[in-house]
Amino acid sequence: MLDRSGGDWRICGVSCRSAAVHDQLAPQDCLYTVAERSVSGTRLRLVQAMAEVLVAPQNPAAVIAAIARPATHLITLTVTEKGYCRDPATGRLDSRHADILHDLQNPSNPRSAPGLLVAGLRARHQNGVAAPTILCCDNLPQNGAAVRAVVVELARRLDPHLADWLEGNATFPSSMVDRIVPATTPDDITQAEQQLGVRDLALVVTEPFTQWVIEDRFAGPRPPLELAGAQWVDDIRPFELAKLRLLNGSHSTLAYLGLALGYRFVHEAMADQDLRTLVEQLMRDELAPTLAPAAGLDPRNYQRRILERFGNSALPYPLSQIAMDGSQKLPQRLLAPLQERLANGRSAPLAVLVIAAWILYCAGLGRSEPYKVDDPLATRFREIAQRAGGSAAGLVAGFLDCSGVFGAELAAAAGFRRQLTTVTTQLMQHGVRAGVRARPGETTHG
């Protein structure tokens, strides 16, 4: 955008956890390279939009000051689904979250992303600085409203006047970002060094495809992001649902089934004809029918593009990275469309198969070799598995009791519970390959 328009917009990056990104970028004057990889080659591009990177645990006051300064007009967030400290089932602030409990007691020295936001916004309000635009870029349905609910609730607990000010002045537009970006590996850095002649420790490796759709609701000045391909819309919902369900839902499918079959990367799993056929059927028969028609959105073409992108062997994307934090991801990716289908008297047997595979993965039964389950509920999942003692019914009952994942309505659906138990039992007895090859079709419930 700056290349096309000039201007004085810059980015101040904030890490809420680790200093790793700061330590990579600071010695490089915040410059980094983007490597776009496809089977036809690699395109390298130097990004010069970063001005500084702050590390919140090291200096929260600097982060709060950056949020509060008058020159800050746009605050974007990419902190993963779990970074908002919200209950996935209710969408409300998780008041029992350790970081939220800390931030309520120490509002000027916060740990969480919502806590940092509220502290910075409180300083803006006290100093008479106009409210900013807060733009979520994470994979949450109606992510702007989701962040608004969490931030306003936390603000209200600390300062009701601040909450009123936010509700009346700040804007929280939703956005949908679609681009596959695997974690950078040492081999990626070495390969780029051979092409660049310099070693870029902050290298970002990605695919050529990119899409950023943003609701046009800004509280103040906005950068002309359309010059770099961003699309302004009045309603983000059709686009975000298509991405969450078709792309992200298919990604999770490949992760839990592919890992169980011994694959490491997305393109390897896609080369398995059984898995590819299942993903195609899941998107076509169970997920796409839950999407409402929308101008500018072609679900069939989007599905074709997804299959092409998943098969990009030049961009190895670890299935283990996708499998992380499933308790935070599956509610919007697969459980929501499944629940909609059940409410309309339709079944979703392929989605149930994936959920059963996820349960076995989280219970430590999803692969032949040992592995670590990386999830905020990992400890609870281990306890459920121990209590179940190898019983599929016990596993399913324990997981359905996780109301923050399934929600009360879905957990109470007797038909769903029976089907999930049956499929989990079949996977335990006959293996994932047999389950994938069976590919049960839809049934209609009266």
Image (cartoon, rainbow, N blue to C red):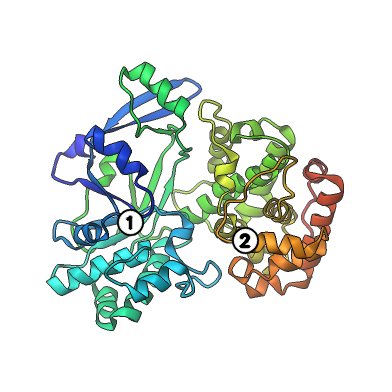
Q: Which residue lies furthest to the right in this view?
A: 429
Side (left or right) of 235 relative to 6: right
How far apart are the alpha carbons under marks 2 and 1? Answer: 25 Å
Q: Residue furthest bottom?
A: 160
Q: Which mark is residue 379?
A: 2
- Spot occupied by residue 366 in the image (x, y as percentages of width and height): 72, 47
Secondary element at tag 2: helix
Q: Residue 111 carries which label?
A: none
Q: Residue at x 65, y 44 (%)?
A: 371
- The answer to whether any part of residue 406 appears in the image is yes
- The correct choice, above or below, for 401 with respect to 302 in the image is below
Q: Which of 116 and 48 is in front in this view?
A: 116
Q: In which quarter of the image is the C terminus?
A: bottom right
Q: Which of 45 and 239 is in front in this view?
A: 45
- The correct choice, above or below, for 427 with respect to 228 in the image is below
Q: Residue furthest front?
A: 58
Dot 1 corresponds to which residue? 57
- Spot occupied by residue 200 in the image (x, y as percentages of width and height): 33, 28
- The correct choice, above or below, for 80 with respect to 159 in the image is above
Kind of residue sitting beneath label 2: Thr
Side (left or right) of 385 relative to 379: right
Kind of residue sitting beneath label 1: Pro
